[in-house]
Image (tube, helix red, strand yellow):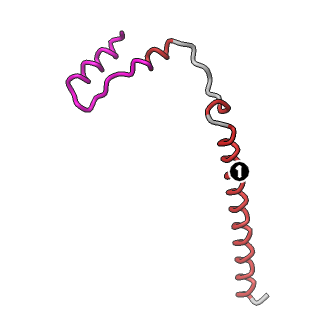
Amino acid sequence: MSLRYRAQEFLADRVSFIQYPDVRASDERGRLALPFRFVESMPWYTRAALICVGVATLLICSAAALLGIYLLKAFISGMLGD
C-alpha cells in the first residue's frame, strides 16, 4: 500500500466528502494496459446507427446551407432589381 492510498483512506475516515480509494484501480495499474479499441467498446448495431445519424445530420445541414444560400441570393437579386 502506498502512502497516497493510506493518506486518502485516513482522510476518508475523518472527512465526509472524501471518498475511499478504489482498490481495483490500483490493482489494474500493475497490469499491462491494453490500448482502447473502438470495436470492442460498443455493439456493431450501435456503431451503425451512430454512423447513419451522423451522415443524415451532415446531409440535412448541407441541404439547409444550400437552401439558405439560394434564398439569400434570391433576396439580394430581388432587392437590387437584377
| Point 49% across, 16% down: residue | 29
Image quarter in which the C terminus is found? bottom right
| Point 67% across, 52% down: residue | 53
**What residue type is disc 1 on?**
Cys
Determine which residue is flagged by label 1.
Answer: 52
Q: Position of residue 69 (x, y in %)?
A: 72, 72
Task: Find residue 45 and report its image quarter.
Answer: top right
Image quarter in which the N terminus is found? top left
In the rendered image of this protein, does residue 48 appear above or below residue 74?
Answer: above
| Point 61% across, 32% down: residue | 41
* Magenta-drawn segment: 1-24
In the rendered image of this protein, does residue 43 appear above or below residue 71?
Answer: above
Residue at the left extreme? Answer: 14
Residue at the bottom extreme? Answer: 81
Task: Find residue 64 and report its image quarter.
Answer: bottom right
Q: Position of residue 35 (x, y in %)?
A: 62, 23
Q: Looking at the picture, tell me which residue is in the foreground, 59 or 53.
A: 53
Task: Find residue 79 and report its image quarter.
Answer: bottom right
In the rendered image of this protein, does residue 24 appear above or below residue 79?
Answer: above
Q: Position of residue 13 (x, y in %)?
A: 22, 22
| Point 39% across, 18% down: residue | 23
**What is the number of callouts on the image?**
1
Secondary structure type for disc 1: helix
| Left or right: residue 49 compared with residue 10 | right
